[in-house]
Image: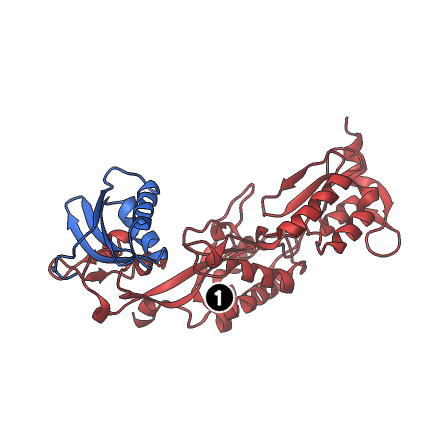
Chain colours: A red, B blue
Amino acid sequence: MTDHFIEDKSNKVTVSIEGPAQKMDFNDLKSGGFIKQKQKDLFTVRLRCPGGKLTTDKLVEISKLAQKYSKKGVVHLSYRQSLEILYVDYKDFNALVADLEKVGQKVASCGPRVRVPTACGGCEYNPNGLTDTQGLAQMVDEKFFGTPTPHKFKTCFSGCPIDCSRTKEMDLGFQGVVDPVWVEADCTGCTLCAPACKEGAIESDPDTGKPIFDPMKCIYCGDCIRACPTEAWKAGKYGHTVRVGGKHGRHPMEAKEVCKFLPDEKVADAVRMTVEWYNANGKRGERIGTAIERVGLENYLKFMEPVFQNNQSAAAAQG
Amino acid sequence: MSDTDIKTQATLDLRGVLCPINFVKTKLKLETMSPGEVLEVILDSGDPIQNVPKSIKDEGHKIVEVKREGDSFRLKVQRGS
C-alpha cells in the first residue's frame, strides 16, 4: 500500500526539465509546479495564471494539451486561481512544458518562494472595484514570481473592502480603497448617501439633509461616491490598504494592517522591500507572520517606512 | 433636493421587491421610456436603497429627487440618453 509513498520520498529518477537529463528528487520537482500525486509516477502540473485570468484562445490550447497529457483527461482549478493538469506522467514533463511554451503558458511554482498572485476582477469590470487588481497581479507576477523566500510567500489583490481575494489571509495583501471627499456646493441635501453607507459613517443633518461624516467608521469603499446623484461626494485619492503576515492552513493568522493608502506606483516597492525584510529576518520554514511576531512589527515597520510613510486617508492626515 | 415637484411619466412601487429584481424592473421600465422622461420608484430602506441608486447611476440615468417616507424612499429617476 505504501509503495508509491516510499518512492515519493526517497527514489531518485532520471527526468529532464529544461536542459540535459539530470538526477532529480521528486521533492525538488515541486519548485517547478510539478506536484506528486498518490498514483505511481503521476503528477499534477500547476500552471501559472496570475489573477486567474486567461484568454479563451489560450484556454482552448491548454485544454487540448490537458486532453493529450492527462491520463484521465481532467483539470482542477487550484485554490489560488491557477489551472492544474492532473494525472501527468513525469516522463512527459519535457514534452508538456515545450507544448505549453508554444502557446505562451508557463508552469507555476510551489515551495518556499513568491507564488503567483491572486486577484479579483478589480476596477476593469466589477462595479465595486476601485483598483486595477488584474494589472497589478500581472506586474507582481512578472517582477517577483519565484523569488526564493524562507517559506511560501502569497500575495493577493482585492479591488474593494469586500475583500474577495482575502488580504487578511495573505503573507502580503493589497485591498483597494478610495478616500471620499464631500463638496458642499454640489450637495442638494437629498440624504441618499446616509442609507447608501453600509458602515453608518454618514448621517443626514435633520434640517438640511446634508451629510455628517464620521471618518472613524469609514472603510473607504466608495459607496457614497457611487450613490450620490449630484457628484457632491467625489473620489479623492485611490490606493491600497496593505496587510502583512496573514495565512490560512493549520494555524491561521490574521494579517496586520500596515498601510492605509498605498498608491499604485509604490506596490512594487512594497513587495520588494517586504521580501527583502523577510529574507533578512525569517527563519527557514517560517512564514512572514511568524517572523514578524518573533522579531516585532516595529522592526518591520521601521524597515518599510520609506515605502509606507505619508500614505494615510485625508481625514486621518488632518487628525 | 429642492421641493419643486418634478413631473413623472410613470411610477414603480418596488417595496417588498428584492435585489437585484428591483433594479432590473427599474431598468426595464426606463428602457420603455424616452430620454429625459422621469420614472418614480419607491424602494425599501436597507439593501434596496444601498444598491439600486448606484446601479441606476452606472447605467447612465440620473436621480433627480429623493424623498424619505418612513421606511421607504421615493426616487425620481430621469432616463439618460
Q: Nearer the viewer, residue A288 or A100?
A: A100
Residue A299 placement (x, y as % from top left): 51, 65
> x and y percent of residue A11 in the render?
84, 40
The outermost residue toward the top is A1
User: Which quadrant of the figure contains the C terminus of chain A?
Assistant: bottom left
Q: Is residue A166 visible?
A: yes
Residue A275 vs residue A154, the one in the foreground: A154
- Number of callouts: 1
Residue A83 % position (x, y)? 65, 45
Image point 31% across, 58% down: which residue? B80
At horizontal 25% and vertical 54% (from top left) the residue drawn is B77
Decide which of A91, A272 is in the foreground and name it.
A91
* Quarter where residue A161 is shown: bottom left
* Circle 1 SS class: helix
Q: Nearer the viewer, residue B49 or A23?
A: B49
**Residue A168, how many percent across, how many down?**
47, 51
- Dividing the picture into quadrants, the one containing residue B18 is top left
The image quadrant where one finds the N terminus of chain A is top right
The residue that mark 1 highlights is A301
Which amino acid type is marked by label 1? Answer: Leu
Q: Is residue A6 left or right of residue A178?
A: right
User: In this image, A213 relative to A30: left or right?
Assistant: left
Residue A35 at least partly seen: no
Q: Residues within 10 Å of mark 1 (few under 14, many from 20)?
A: some
Chain identity of mark 1: A
